[in-house]
Image: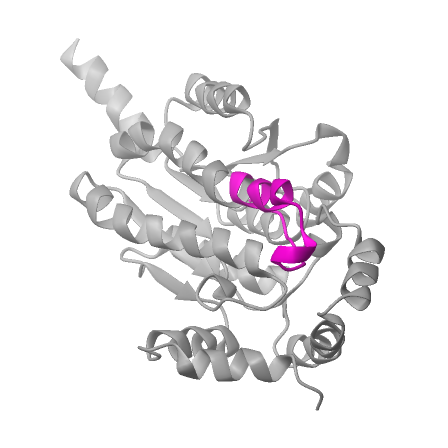
Amino acid sequence: MIASVQNMTDTAASAPKTVLITGTSSGVGRAAAVAAAQAGFTTIATVRDLERTEQLREAAKDAGVELEIRRLDVTEPDTIEQTISGVLDTYGKLDAVVNNAGVGSIGTLELLPLEQIRYSMEVNFFGVLAVSKAALPHLRASGGRLITVGSAYGSVGQPFNEAYCAAKAATEIYMEGLAAVAAEVGVRVSVIQPGPIASSFGENMPVDRVALRAAAEAGQYKSAYANYLTYLPTMVASAIQSSEQVAESVLHTLTDPAPAFRIQTSDFAKGFVADKLADVDGSAIQAITREWLRAG
């Protein structure tokens, strides 16, 4: 009997590590799922809509890897519990979770309904907490990793992007506090901070862009919004990364014996975050972001 239990323990220890990644239908999530599978992880790639997995399946096929695709909507607690329970039933353990699912938002306070701002918080903040809470008992059991894909914009409030930045900032601060607690029970917590990414992420924003622009141009924000839209492509073009490059940082965080808590994926992101962390009274960041809204 003792030998049998020991054999089961040895088998579990030698089995591939199991990682669950949210939001894998496109962008960083899809690239991270493929990279994790290539690195030998048993990868559970979760999506909100199982009808939108063609590109994910094609990416896995092209890379010569297998993914287990399951439905998980971070705003639906039942799907979170069912998916994590299913992983435990199938594999007996959960070694890592990558919170990647998210939604963008563009606009400013007077131009957005509060419902849209709440939705940004629901997906980008509460959704992350819901998945993390459900996973933590199992990550404690495995001495695992809890990784969240945040944003450099979670450190710096970006004009006309306040709702997204606020949700990412709340997530980062929550995880920063949680990291110390989780470390006491053997779970490493990290936040990945990309800068601009070339992906379809922005296409999924719940925003009527035509209506938003019309509202801005009809009101007091016409000049600032126009200047912002002129400046933004210049900033993005100089710093943009591919989803695959960001996924490399995710994979490194999954495999590094002692990953940092806060991990920037580019020099741009490092500089962006460093400016904020050094700006004690907020004046330097205000000078930077207000310049974005002025005619060049």
Residue 51 image position (x, y, % from top left)? 76, 30
Outermost residue toward the bottom in this view: 296
* Span colored in magenta: 101-122
Q: In which quarter of the image is the N terminus?
A: top left
Specify the color scheme. one colour
**Residue 102 location, x and y as percent?**
58, 46
Q: Is residue 121 magenta?
A: yes
Q: Is residue 146 magenta?
A: no
For the question of whether residue 270 can be seen, the reply is yes
The residue depicted at 32 percent of the width and 58 percent of the height is 261
Residue 30, placed above or below residue 270: above
**In the depicted structure, whether residue 161 falls above or below residue 271:** above
Q: Is residue 268 left or right of residue 292?
A: left
Residue name at image x 26 percent, y 28 percent: 10
Location of the C terminus by quadrant is bottom right
Decide which of 122, 261 is in the foreground and name it: 122
Q: Is 37 situated left or right of 26 in this image?
A: left
Residue found 56% across the figure and 54% down from its top: 163
| Residue 162 occupies quadrant | bottom right
In this rendered view, identify the residue nearer to me: 265 or 67: 265
Q: Which x, y percent locates residue 201?
A: 68, 53
Would residue 18 be found to the left or right of residue 247 on screen? left
